[in-house]
Amino acid sequence: MKFVVSSGDLLNRMQIAGRAIASKNPIPILGEFLFTISGSQLKITGCDAEIRVVATLEVSDADRDGSIAIPGNKLIEYLKRLPEQPVSFNINDETLAIEISTTSGKSNQAGHNGDEYPELKALEDNKKQITMSSDAILAGITHTLFATANDDLRPIMNGILFDIEENQTTFVATDTHIMARYIRKDTTSAEKSAFVLGKKPASLLKNVLTPGENVSIEFDGKSAVFNTEKLQITCRLTEGNYPQYKSVIPNSNPYNVTINRQDLSNAIARSSLFCDGTELVKFEVSSNSIHISAQDLDFSCSASETIACQYVGNDMVIGLKASYFANILSNMSSTDIEMQLSDPSRAAIVTPTEKNDTEDELMLIMPMKV
């Protein structure tokens, strides 16, 4: 089997597919890449027990269809050190020896039978489908991934919920202390459905999807397949019932604080240096300012700051965990944010003041006892 391919394109696709390959695999061949030639296309597959990535690129001078498993570490490092140029692969069908030729030299390595590479299990007949832009998926993951849990006892909390309706998709993540909900209103689906995407595949999608392309998503109760023009990402879904997130969001938080997001974030960062192990920061809200304070009695240290805000409501004192609130603020892009409060024992809602017709962003943080 022979083919010629661009060194830069090959490196790019191998790096993408390689994100699915775990450092340690119970099956040795899963530590390798599957190269499959079909006509003028080369498909490069990398997978582990949870994720499978197939990256496609064009080749020339392919003499026949076929497949081979190739150890990828040395090849990737070899390509990194190679200027952009055509690279020729010549694979011995009997010995599976691989000869790689460039304009300046040759290298050789051993391959393995591609037929031994695990096959992909097809989705069930009752699979569902939705089409959305990569921009919507990237935004949904970016605005929620930070709020996923690390809970071995409740793995359903360790992923992002895709709650799909006819004209919108809601992305939700929560670790029970904070919740991130992001609604995208420019997606289409024939029916209402939902699935939970684990943290690892969500992170992979965030890193490999290209903005500005359409993504077709097919899924059943166990797996989801994300298809673009040059990528196919198959991942195992997290099974179980996701918490009823809508019931957690307070229906009425009548008191509203409007404040500069970066000013608030900086003040929390400075004050939190003087927190005790609980990371409790106290917020005293009045008509035109928020007084932020923290203390650690064991080390006899404390800090306080006052920053300007607009506030409509009764004066209030509420305690929030510094790292949780900092995460929320760092994952919002609005210049100003609005905090919606009701009393010190109920969840605070954080939303951007800048809104548009295609998205709706909401963060929630549970209070701490002051």
Image (cartoon, rainbow, N blue to C red):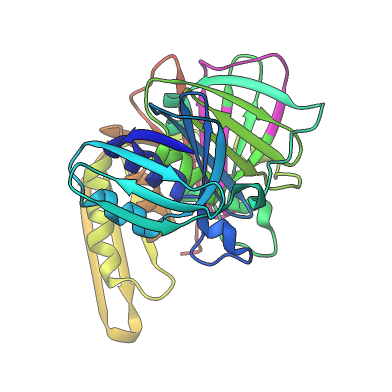
Q: Residue at x 62, y 51 (%)?
A: 50
What segment carries the magenta color?
170-194
Overall secondary structure of the magenta section: strand
From the viewer's perspective, is 321 left or right of 30?
left
Q: Report the front residue among 100 and 239.
A: 100
| Residue 289 quadrant | top left
Looking at the image, which is closer to me, 274 or 3? 3
In the image, what residue occupies the spot 33% across and 77% down? 296
- Residue 344 visible? The answer is no
Q: In the rendered view, would you say 181 is above or below 188? A: below
Q: Is residue 308 left or right of residue 203?
A: left
Q: Up-down: is 30 above or below 92? A: below
Q: Residue furthest right?
A: 125
Counting from the top left corner in percent of width and height, residue 126 is at 81, 26
Give the vertical position of 295 relative to 284 (above or below): below
Quadrant assignment, res 353: top left
Q: Residue at x 63, y 21 (%)?
A: 130
In-image side of 164 versus 93 (left or right): right
Residue 252 in the image, given as x and y percentages of width and height: 57, 33
The one of 232 and 164 positioned closer to us in this rendering: 232
Q: Position of residue 367 (x, y in %)?
A: 50, 55
For residue 65, say whether it is visible. yes
Q: Position of residue 72 (x, y in %)?
A: 42, 55
Magenta segment includes 179: yes
Asked if the stretch drawn in magenta spans residue 336, the answer is no
